[in-house]
Image: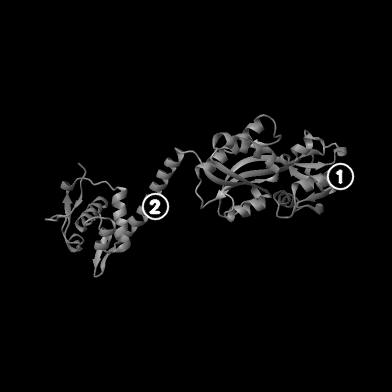
Amino acid sequence: MPIIVGISGKTSFATPLRQIFNPHKRYKINSSLGRFPMTPKLLKSFLKLAEMGNLSRSSAQLHLTQPALSRQMQLLEGEVGARLFERHGRGVALTDAGRVLRKRAEKLLRDIDEIRNEITASASEPEGEIAVGLPTPLNAMLAAALVDRLWETAPKLRLRIFEGAPHQIRDQLNQGLLDLGVLSADEYGAGLTRLPFVTEKLFVAGAPRFELDRNERFAVEKLLDLPLVQASPQNGVTMILARHFSKAQRALDLRIEASSTHLMIAIAATGRCFTVLPYSALAEDIARGRISAAPLTRLSMHWAMARRADHRATVGMKVVVQILHDTARARIEAGHWPTARYVSKSAEL
């Protein structure tokens, strides 16, 4: 049988705490106590005594007798092989070993609670509300499928979808207004947990009369010769363009700044300007013949799932993330999302 440190002598449940925790008393190995498991209940008693520093008040809050609490602490000290408390005039205080145990015990009990909550939640149907931010380019690819799947698999889950620019989604995530969001790589912010999602090529788009071919690559350097309509400098695509051409001899001709994807496409369709956007933003207009577009060489958009790092992923959030991943992968495999690659190794955010 494994041996633990026990207290010699005639210690009983009624032994005063000052005797049990007497720093001058000699200890010896005592195997008669057996091995006492370090249970959550025992750790909670330890933390309560550490918090209050008083045996009488701690035992009252724990609904234990003083001798029973003293016995628990005696067994716990035997288990760790070190004194955890020192007696002083107003009660007891933690030793160095006690402070180490308190820090670890607090984390361990939090982990146990999270495990219990996750197991309970995983066995139940997701419900409540979840707010998801989708960039305008991805709405046509993902939003309808997300609603359809949730309707069938999680009917009790209320969904709120916010459509906006990636930097707006980032800001709303940081403010706690969204639970989940899809961002471009250039919109990552501090305090966000993110998961790589999809990478797709950027396209140059213009009026149909320019006969841009989505199956033929367009040299990115030719953008320097075109008048462009783009979003604000904070937009992900605009930042990609600025970074790529930062060392060029000439600057891009950013002729018009537009506030929305739909406006950029409408202006490009007039033939006055061109615009650069991911294929997901252009797919519907290409299919209807409103514009023509071609993939640019060397420029891609990298999408990622994101949530607040200090917000625990709920069952509902995990369901939404899984649906978005399944939808993206299915569209890519079916050929409905040209130039896109599914890059995630896991749907666990």
Left or right of 193? Residue 199 is right
Q: Residues within 10 Å of mark 2 (few under 14, many from 20)?
A: few
Q: Secondary structure at mark 1?
A: loop
**Location of residue 202 in the rendering, given as x and y in whole percent from the top left corner:** 73, 42
Q: Nearer the viewer, residue 76 or 122?
A: 122
Residue visible at 59% across and 53% down in the picture? 177
Task: Examine the image and state in which quarter residue 232 appears.
Answer: bottom right
Q: Nearer the viewer, residue 301 or 60?
A: 60
Can you name the residue that lies furthest to the front here? 156
- Tell me if I can see residue 39 in this picture: yes
Q: Secondary structure at mark 2?
A: helix
Q: Nearer the viewer, residue 26 or 348?
A: 348
- Tell me if I can see residue 97 in this picture: no
**Location of residue 333 in the rendering, given as x and y in whole percent from the top left corner:** 65, 30
Residue behind mark 2: 107
Residue visible at 85% across and 38% down in the picture? 208
Residue visible at 79% across and 44% down in the picture? 265
Reply above or below: 71 against 281. Answer: below
User: What amino acid is at disc 2?
Assistant: Lys
User: What amino acid is at disc 1?
Assistant: Thr
Can you name the residue that lies furthest to the top here? 334
**Disc on the earlier residue, 1 or 2:** 2
Left or right of 299? Residue 71 is left
**Location of residue 97 in the rendering, given as x and y in whole percent from the top left corner:** 30, 58
Residue behind mark 1: 270
**Location of residue 226 in the rendering, given as x and y in whole percent from the top left corner:** 84, 47
Q: CA distance from mark 1 to mark 2?
A: 61 Å
Can you name the residue that lies furthest to the bottom here? 89
Instruction: Report the mark closest to the observer, 1 or 2.
Output: 1
State yes or no: discs 1 and 2 in contact (Cβ < 8 Å). no
Task: Examine the image and state in which quarter residue 22 appears.
Answer: bottom left
Residue visible at 39% across and 48% down in the picture? 113
